[in-house]
Structure formats: structure tokens, C-alpha cells
Image (cartoon, rainbow, N blue to C red):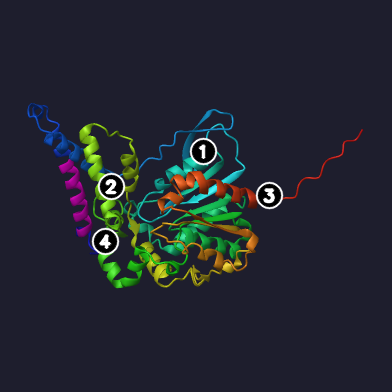
Amino acid sequence: MRYMATYDLMETVRNTNQWLGATARAFGSYPATGLFPTPAFKVMAAWGEVMERSFSRMIAKPDWNISSVVGEDGRDHVVTTHALVERPFGDLIKFEVQGRGPMRRRVLLVAPMSGHYATLLRSTVISLLPDCDVYLTDWHNARDIPVSEGKFDIEDYTLYLAEFMEHLGADLHVIAVCQPAPLTLAATAYLAEKNPDAQPQTLTLIGGPIDPDAAATDVTDFGARITMGQLEEVAIQRVGFNYIGAGRLVYPGLLQLSSFMSMNADRHGEAFFNQILRVAKGEASDHDHHNRFYDEYLAVMDMPAEFYLSTVERVFKNLEIARNDFTVAGHKVDIGKITTVAVKVVEGEKDDISAPGQCLAALRLCTGLPESKKAAHLEPGAGHYGIFAGKSWRNNIRPLVLDFIDTNGIEAAAPSPKPQLKTV
């Protein structure tokens, strides 16, 4: 599988399906078909529209589409994004709210590098912007990174996170969503030894595989069954000649997407069937629930092969984070060295990606942290997506996280100023 031909073959299949969708849409919408009293042509055009849109989204990075936020003054403030730190495999970006002063809460959202773009956290960003200055890790698509930039594995990822935290300073609150949770915990422990003053005030870990063996899922079962040799053979390909990263070994986004879809094939199949019927009836819209969700879900990016393989081997198979045996740049990281950063764990009761118990293991590893600085929340009835972007996040989890930040922030820890006596 480690050939450009297989990568280009998948791209060819995707392109062909996009073309078939466009053709069916055009043919089914041809004016002359109105002469025939049958809904078949409308269904054909609807199928083509859904097909074309779906396959075209797979190679496009979604926009943030966050134009403004309402400030405390009741006015809309324009939101822009710009990079504070630029690196080959990912940038540290800030959501700049024009005309608004610095906020009391400064939050770094650590986005997953697990097949989707950082825009997967769009709704999370929107929910935090009114109350926080928001920063985010914007990971790059590996197919767009020249081979000359070298490798990028989980140790490099951890060092990126440590650098981003150091750049933002100590008055920071970090929220890691899903895949980066164990590496964000490791980066915090790394700073605890290397640069204690750069540690964040709080660390919130949401649905991450700190200890994959704590609760079995399809993801952990797959990691346990397959050998590293088999995984490298079936999952790794070289980027084709159409991209800047030609020749780079990657885990292709299209291959990842097929794995995502297969986990809930029945649900996805029903969703697309119903959408075709809605389009045929004229009940669909460009920004309806289906399109909003799948425009993001279908937009996938390639991961560097060394990052994917080292994640499976070291986090899932060898359990280096769970056993507190993780090494970064030759330095053994000790999670027990975290003694001042308040840590909160959030899990979803029905999470089928990182099941309850996997993320909770982080609190067990923080042996140097007093119990007063540990917190955990299990959201009833919530799945994986809901705990950081859905209704459960908006209504229940977000208020708890903000309260945790306020309780453990610098302002909460600082003594109250003594009253000043006036001289008469």
C-alpha cells in the first residue's frame, strides 16, 4: 500500500464520484424532463446534488465562518483569525475580537489531529468567544507539507504543545478535546519539569484515551488486534504528485473517513437516504442540519504516517501515557510532577470512541496533585461529539468548565486586596 499509485487511485475514485453526482444532477434537472410525469428525474437530480456535494467536501478545508460575536456592550464585534506561532505541521492561532479588550479568561483549545480539521471545534469556539480570549492549535494537512520538512510524531506533537503554552504564558487555561488529551497531559508534565512558570492554570481533558485499556471500544479492539506491520501495510500510502507533499508517507484522510463511516454505517446510510428525499421534495436547504454536519464531517485531512503509527503503538498498544512511561526528546516525562495545575476530566456516558474510564485515568496519574485540584464529570446520555460540540456541551459541560476555570484561576487564588484607609 505504500505507493503513490494507491493514493492517486483513491483520489481518482473520489473525483469520479463527484463527477457522477454532477452529471446526474445536470441530467435530472434538464428542462425537457419536465414533460414526463414521473418523480424519477427529481430523485436523480437530488441524488446527484447530494453525491456531488459530499465528495467535493472531502478535499476542501472548511472555513471557520465566525464573523462576529456579541460583546458585553451589546454590540457585534468582528472576529478575525491570525497566527501567533507558525510551524510546518501546525500553527497557534488566535480568534481576535475587534474592539474588545483582553478578557479575564484566556483559553487554549487543543484540537485533535485525528483525520478532521480543527474546524471540527467551530461550535466550541463560538460558545467560548463571548466569555474568553480563545486560542487554538490549527494542524496542517500532511499532503500539503513538503517532505523536506521532516517527520512529525507524537513527541514532536507534544513539543509543539509545550511551545504553544510557553508562548501564551502562565495565565492560561487549556482544554484538550479527544485525541490530544494524553499528549496535552504529557506536555503539561514536561513543562512542570522544564519550565514550571509556563504551566497553565487549569487543564480540562475531554473524552481522551489516557488509558485505552480502562474501557474497551471498537477503536481499542482494533488497536489490540492488528500488528504494527499489518497496520503500516494497510493504512500507509505516499502522497500523489498533485500535492506539495508528494512522496510523504501519510495515513490518508479518505481512508480514515471510510473507517469513520463504517463504525456507524447504518446511521450514515439512513441520513443520506433521507437527505436525498428532502432535496427531491424541495425541503432541504444549503445550511440545514444535514449539510452543516456532513460538510464538516466529510472534510478530512491526511496525517503524517509517523504520527499515526506512533500514536497506535505508544498510546494504545504500549500504554506509555497510562503507565507514566512516556519519553519526549530523550526525557522521561513524569505526570506526577504536575502539582499546581488543576485538572478536570469530562466524559460522555455513551461515548463509543473514548469510553468512560479512559480519560478518568488522568486523575490517577496526577499523584502529586492535591484532591482539591482534581475534578471529574460524566455527562449522562452524551456521545463523543456531544461532550465538546453538541447540546450537552452547550447546556451542561461548558458552564461547568468555565466555573472550574474561575475557581482555579489566578484571580481566585490571589488574596483579596486590603482596604485602603483614607487620610482625612
Against 216, residue 149 (above or below) is above
Where's the C terminus, which quadrant? top right
Q: Is residue 79 left or right of residue 191?
A: left
Q: Pointer 1: what residue?
A: 96
- Does any portion of residue 280 appear in the rendered image? yes
The three-letter amino acid code for the residue at tag 3 is: Ala
Which mark is in front, 1 or 3?
A: 3
Q: Pointer 4: what residue?
A: 237
Which mark is in front, 1 or 2?
A: 2
The three-letter amino acid code for the residue at tag 2 is: Met
What's the CA distance linking mark 1 and mark 4?
A: 38 Å
The three-letter amino acid code for the residue at tag 1 is: Glu
- Does any portion of residue 93 appear in the rendered image? no
- Which element carries disc 3, helix, strand or loop? helix
- Which element carries disc 1, helix, strand or loop? strand
| Magenta range | 6-21
On the image, the x and y values in percent for residue 121 come to 43, 47
Q: Which quadrant of the figure has residue 344?
A: bottom right
Q: Pointer 3: what residue?
A: 412
Q: Pointer 2: what residue?
A: 58
